[in-house]
Amino acid sequence: MIHGPCGTLNQNSPCMMDGKCSKRYPKTLISETITGNDGYPLYRRRSRVDNGRTTIIKLNKQDIEIDNRWIVPYSPILSKTFKTHINVESCHSVKSIKYICKYVTKGNDMAVIGIGAENCNDEVTQYQMGRYVSSNEAVWRIFSFPIHERHPSVLHLAVHLENGQRVYFTPHNAVQRAAQPPSTTLTSFFETCQNDDFAQT
């Protein structure tokens, strides 16, 4: 998978914004994979000195030599399985959590339409926010297929200090509750970790 090329080789590339590549190509040639200052991984890209590969491609009827700086990170297994180009990169920055949550919770596709009339003196343009449902999504929802899932399920633990959990009592069971406070999700989690072999791994 080759990106572009763009930059000085092709200023008309779709990725070009303000004279620079929005995808940060060409990448830097480095001998080993490291984490950059901004949290993005800098993958190993071998130079010619480190036995890196090059190839020649045609662009605007010109031969251009491409090296590892222009290669898009990919998974050979996924590309072969799905028979398509798939960009695969490591996500370990704090920002990746926000990115994933935005996609899960962003909702359906929306469209904004304007409503107006000819020779109308109303200075306020009325807008209506409409929900767009494609035919694919409509069929998916009609057959009640799952929209998304979480596995394993996530349970919020009631975090508290030792013997500091909330205890609800009545005048009739105050002594019993004080002597034997009920288990919470946190104390039950600790008990499971002590007794269950799988939880200890």
Image (cartoon, rainbow, N blue to C red):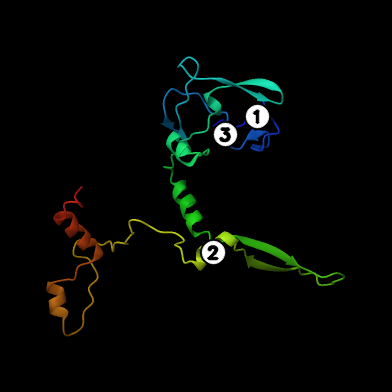
* 154 relative to 83 in the view: left or right: left
Indicate the quadrant containing the N terminus: top left, top right, bottom left or bottom right.
top right
Measuring from the top left, give residue 177's x and y in whole percent.
16, 75
Tell me the element at label 3. loop
Q: Amino acid at mark 2?
A: Val
Q: Which residue is mark 3?
A: 24
Q: Amino acid at mark 1?
A: Gly
* 33 relative to 158 in the view: left or right: right
Above or below — where is 2 with respect to 158? above
Above or below — where is 42 with respect to 156? above
Measuring from the top left, give residue 192's x and y in whole percent.
18, 58
Mark 1 is surrounded, within 10 Å at the Cα level, by few (under 14), some (14 to 19) or many (20 or more) other residues, namely some
Residue that appears at 19% across and 68% down: 183
Give the spatial CA distance, label 3 vs label 1.
10 Å
Residue that appears at 44% across and 50% down: 97
Give 147 or 70, whichever is nearer the viewer.
147
Regarding residue 59, the answer to whether it shows in the image is yes
* 121 relative to 74 in the view: left or right: right
Regarding residue 40, the answer to whether it shows in the image is no
Above or below — where is 67 with respect to 107? above
Question: Are the two marked residues, 2 and 3, in contact with CB atoms closer than 8 angstroms?
Answer: no
Above or below — where is 35 with respect to 31? below
Viewer-side label of 1, 2: 2
Residue 7 bears which disc, if any?
Answer: 1
* 20 relative to 189 in the view: left or right: right
Q: Amino acid at mark 3?
A: Arg
Mark 2 is surrounded, within 10 Å at the Cα level, by few (under 14), some (14 to 19) or many (20 or more) other residues, namely few
Viewer-side label of 2, 3: 2
